[in-house]
Image: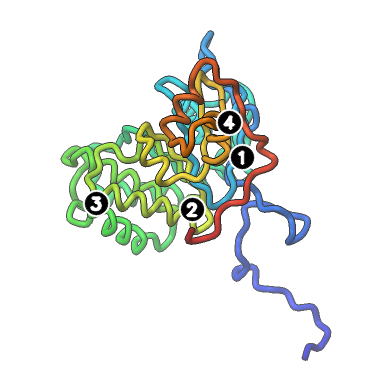
């Protein structure tokens, strides 16, 4: 029974949200929205009018030939490069006008992570924790180091790490603040088989927990194994966004059970027309655990 007095929930106990909605039935805010994102370098347009929408629990493959604009896109999304036009929004926050809020919700691991040569593995994590003003982060840091087999190296400076250990350190640092959007450029570079298995499991878990992953790799077998959504870029233009099945229908309908390599070759051929799916009508993400 109640006494008629309105009950107000404890704000500290209420779950935080990255967006506002008129009611509980409103569609959730996409984790990433690209709206005509463009980057020019003098006379070169490296990325032109990129438009896409990535929902929670998606693992998205960003694929294209060398020089297609993939790294440019990732650097614009993460705020390293300022777009020439258009915008990228992370959980509803514009990377240009709300960079701090947007960057709190993303992490970017480049293909060649640059570490601080004189900091130890654990000191890198301490630095990240300070930058993001994290509290009680040490247990999570210890779990990450253990999972990526870095515990024996926690007090080793970066200058003394192998290429694979440096990659693992960068990945651990990127996961420490629990980002909603994880951007990975060639994440398997230098990793041993156990490291590859671990990062693949982490990617799947991140999506299952409600995050999203934007993954760029030339290892198409990895992409086909992990990803449920494709974004094909060629000469700075997004040629296609959609599911693998939609990609087969657009580029390899005549090839029964075409794999990603066949789709890739056809989608990046100069005669292939852009066939990007409308970003306002995304396919629902898969159920957790599938």
Q: Label 3, on which residue?
A: 194
Say which quadrant the N terminus sits in: bottom right
Which comes before the other along the chain, label 1 or label 4?
1
In three-dimensional space, the C-alpha distance between marks 1 and 4, rounded to whole angstroms, equals 19 Å
Of residues 105 and 256, which is closer to you in this image? 256
Choose the circle earlier in sequence order: 3 or 1: 1
Q: Secondary structure at mark 4?
A: helix
Q: 85 left or right of 40?
A: right
**N-term mark: 3 or 4:** 3
Side of 238 relative to 278 (left or right): left
The tag earlier along the polypeptide, 4 or 2, is 2
- Which of the numbered marks, if any, corresponds to residue 53? 1
In this rendering, position of residue 288 left or right of residue 192: right
Q: Is residue 98 visible?
A: yes
Give the CA distance from mark 2 to mark 1. Answer: 15 Å
Find disc 2 in the rendering and name its residue: 207
| Residue nearest the observer in this picture, 100 or 253 | 253
Left or right of 166 in this view: 63? right
Q: Which mark is residue 250?
A: 4
Relative image position of residue 178 (x, y in whole percent):
45, 54
Q: CA distance from mark 3 to mark 1?
A: 32 Å
Query: Which residue is depicted at the point 74% across and 59% down?
Result: 25
Local secondary structure at mark 2: helix
């Amino acid at each position: 029974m109640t006494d008629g007095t309105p009950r107000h929930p404890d704000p500290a106990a209420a779950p935080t949200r990255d967006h506002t909605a008129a009611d509980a039935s409103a569609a959730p805010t996409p984790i990433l929205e690209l709206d005509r994102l463009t980057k020019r370098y003098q006379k070169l347009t490296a990325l032109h009018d990129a438009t896409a929408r990535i929902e929670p629990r998606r693992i998205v493959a960003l694929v294209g030939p060398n020089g297609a604009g993939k790294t440019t896109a990732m650097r614009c999304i993460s705020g390293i490069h300022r777009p020439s036009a258009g915008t990228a929004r992370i959980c509803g926050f514009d990377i240009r006008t709300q960079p701090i809020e947007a960057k709190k919700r993303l992490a970017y691991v480049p293909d060649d992570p640059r570490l601080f040569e004189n900091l130890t593995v654990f000191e890198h994590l301490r630095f990240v924790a300070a930058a993001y003003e994290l509290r009680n982060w040490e247990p999570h840091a210890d779990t990450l180091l253990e999972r990526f087999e870095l515990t024996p190296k926690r007090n080793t400076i970066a200058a003394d790490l192998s290429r694979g250990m440096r990659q693992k350190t960068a990945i651990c640092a990127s996961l420490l603040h629990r980002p909603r959007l994880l951007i990975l450029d060639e994440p398997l570079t230098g990793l041993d088989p156990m490291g590859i298995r671990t990062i693949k499991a982490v990617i799947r878990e991140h999506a299952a927990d409600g995050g999203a992953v934007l993954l760029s790799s030339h290892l198409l077998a990895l992409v086909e194994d992990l990803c449920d959504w494709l974004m094909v870029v060629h000469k700075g233009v997004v040629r296609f966004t959609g599911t693998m099945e939609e990609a087969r229908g657009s580029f390899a309908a005549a090839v029964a059970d075409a794999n990603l390599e066949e789709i890739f070759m056809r989608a990046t051929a100069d005669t292939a027309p852009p066939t990007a799916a409308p970003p306002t009508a995304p396919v629902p993400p898969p159920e957790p655990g599938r």
